[in-house]
Amino acid sequence: MKYLNLDQKYDVIVGGGGNAGLCAAISACERGKRVLVVVKDKYEFRGGHSKYSECVLVAHEEGWHGLRGFSADEFYKLIMKASKGHADPKLLKFYTENSKEYVEFVEKHGVRWMQDAKYAISPYLKRAHPALDIIGGGQALVNHLYHWLEKRSDRCKIIYNSEIVKINAEDGVFRSLEANVDGSKVTLRADNLILATGGFEGNVELMRKIWGKKFDYLRFRSSTINTGIPIFEMERNGAAMVGRMDEGVHPIVDARVPKFDGGVIARDYSIPFGITVNRNVERIFDEGIYAGGVGEVTCTRILLEQPDGIAYSIFDRKVWGMFKPHAYPPIKDDTLEGLAGKLGLDPSKLMNLVKRFNSSIVPGKTYTTGLEPPKSKNARPIDTPPFYAYPLAPGFSFTRYSMKVNEEARVIRTNNRPFDNVFAAGTTMVGNFLTEDEYLGCFDIPLGGFFGIMAGKNV
Amino acid sequence: MSEILDDLMEEGIREYNLCSACRFCIGYCPVWDALDRIFFGFKKESVDHRDIEYFAYLCHDCRNCYYACPYRQPHELNINIPKLNSMLREKVNNSYVWPGFMRGMLKRQYMYMTSSIMAFLALAFVLTAIVGDLSALMLPIHSIYHVMPSIYIEMIGSVLGVWGMTLLIYEGARYWKSINGNYKGIFNGRLHLYALRDTFMHLWFRANGEGCDYPGEYGSFSRFYLHLLMFTGMLVDLVATITALYAQNILGYYPPYSLFSFPVMLGIMGGALILVGVVGLLVLKESANSKLIESAWIETDRAMLYLLLAIVVSGFVITSMRSMPFAGLMFLVHISLVATLFVSAPYSKLVHIIYRYLAVVKYYYDKRILSAV
């Protein structure tokens, strides 16, 4: 740390080295501010949870990057519906109308989209909403942003391996913060603080307390780095909070992924194409609703209630190649009995279940009748060997317990007045839009980044 | 290629299967597109050894996928596709070398090239003594053909060139058989047109406009330009040689040609391009991240660059010291170096030309099969 004078007073301290924090830092740096970015991870792991993101969904006109039109109004309605009306209408309107700014911002700093790739573009890339896919994914996105900042290291510095442990504010004004920088305790001062430190999904102790025995069933897509201390510190300093503590169960993942930091490869896409059964060979939910958005959360919650939190997605040869495979090979057999044997399930029960499932599909249609739970979409008989199974476990993405903010990304206090100089961006404020187990793919990254840009503008 | 079915192959299957569950790298290069096709197009359950071998050379070593990967070291899933591919390339090179006992040469390039240069030099001396004039080696000469009559140079050069080319093509055919399972598609002219276009334009050295993460962590076009310069230089020199042959054998103009004649001008231009390209690539190699490449391969790369450098420099020396003493000797050195380039083609870095080219043909072949289905 010898190159860095930490006693120096900065204009802005940005907590967090993911997409939102970097957007905030760049946005402030571009306006001539002196910025210090405090990143908890080591250099090798930088990028927070953003590195697992794959796409960005913003409002845009028809034909933009070759996508179909997606108006601000359509976007607004989509979020309102997904949030069951919880989203802050004024904030949401502001965001949906200006969301494109995020894409233009990151493009300026080198991020490129698969939709623009003239060459070697997969024809199999399809998505429910007209979102842009980042070439190289979230890690490439943050690398581009880091690169921009590194070129301006005279004014805008990044310190890794540095954790914010205490935030001192009085009467709505941030004064200083205490941090562990490379293992030594330091006090950092700045005129402004932007918090983009993510949720607390990596806080093992707290997660154990919240989820009890079910903690053992969960597979965390993130690393254990995000402990949420800055959020709780701000709560202690009088920030108004939104959302619940026990959110973030989503999506369903392969049971064989690492307990932590499984990231994007963990996710299952096979569920809508087969049936999902628990240890007792019972179907546990309507597989048809597991296809992005809120349905995923509902299904993951149901899986979390099953014995040992384990289930199996069972499908046959004819649907293979219709969805992204898992990182680990499927369990496979030429007969259903054989497959049941390999999974440790009761073979006759599985045979009966599949038989009943196949016969309840309405002829010529792709939904079932007289089956509980039904399969409302994509129901096809399971009859073409070989048969496959993926072991499934409930995944955990990120928490949404957030600080309340206004359009300037300023944190609101419990007395409804904003802090003078504290801003939030990214997962620290996403609860203003989606809370209570609501989820929408490709939404968080542009949202977090956009409010980062706003924060950087308004410091 | 049964001998590759080992730990490395298994590791390749593990890594590519993991990649197929992510696919964020689609757009950087055709490997990811091809990987997508394995599952969605051909509906295979897993990548297999054919795909792995095919990807190894479809990869142009731009390394963007490494830096974009959240699973790279020190993550426990430990993905390092550039390194994997370079290790596989080494295996591929070894597997298709013909004759088999030449296998070790890929790892002993300096030894092989030096002995080859020495052997050709000795042969050249003997030949000069028999058919030419040994004293011309030391004295100022009017034409290089005083040292050795052109017919010998042309004949030996053609034989060695054809021999090197034939072996390269033979090795390529074995590679194609292995990645494709049969010889189908190899004679489809349209596929070759696509592949030639990509090769001439260096389309896949650009990581879709971001530039390759080579030699450093962030996108750069330096290798694209340098490799393109070297490649263009070689083509220009090829044209220069053909022009000279034409002038001599068809039009009957014998050398020496003036400095401003077509063959000499082209030769100098090509040489300059190669010189810039080779030196630049050697410099880039110094600062490249060596964790991302099989270490044995770095020296194989370097040996070829040094050989090209020696050829170009000796060529320039002859051009600049025409009609001075020892030009004849320098000429023998130069042709020995060129002869070494020809005979080492199937046992050196140059094999990448045929393998990578065929991998690109295979890419279009698969694309075509699927669109026809």
Image (cartoon, rainbow, N blue to C red):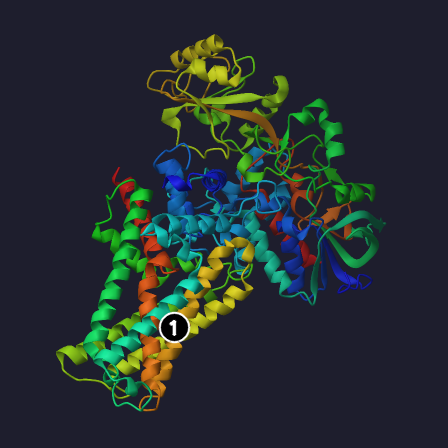
In the picture, measured across the screen, residue A28 lies left or right of residue B251, that is right
| Residue in the picture at 47% in, 12% down | A350
Q: Quadrant of the C terminus of chain B?
A: top left
Q: Compare residues B139 and A23 and report the one nearer the observer.
A: B139
Q: How many marks?
A: 1
- x and y, in percent, of residue A73 in the image: 51, 43
- Residue A301, by quadrant, is top right
- x and y, in percent, of residue A119 in the image: 37, 53
In the picture, measured across the screen, residue B143 lies left or right of residue A19, that is left
| Residue in the picture at 20% in, 70% down | B155
Q: Which residue is mark 1?
A: B274
Q: Compare residues B247 and B218 and report the one nearer the observer.
A: B247
The residue type indicated by label 1 comes to Ile
Q: Quadrant of the N terminus of chain B?
A: top left
- x and y, in percent, of residue A46 in the image: 64, 50
- x and y, in percent, of residue A353 in the image: 46, 11
Q: Secondary structure at mark 1?
A: helix
Q: Is residue B298 above or below residue B252?
A: above
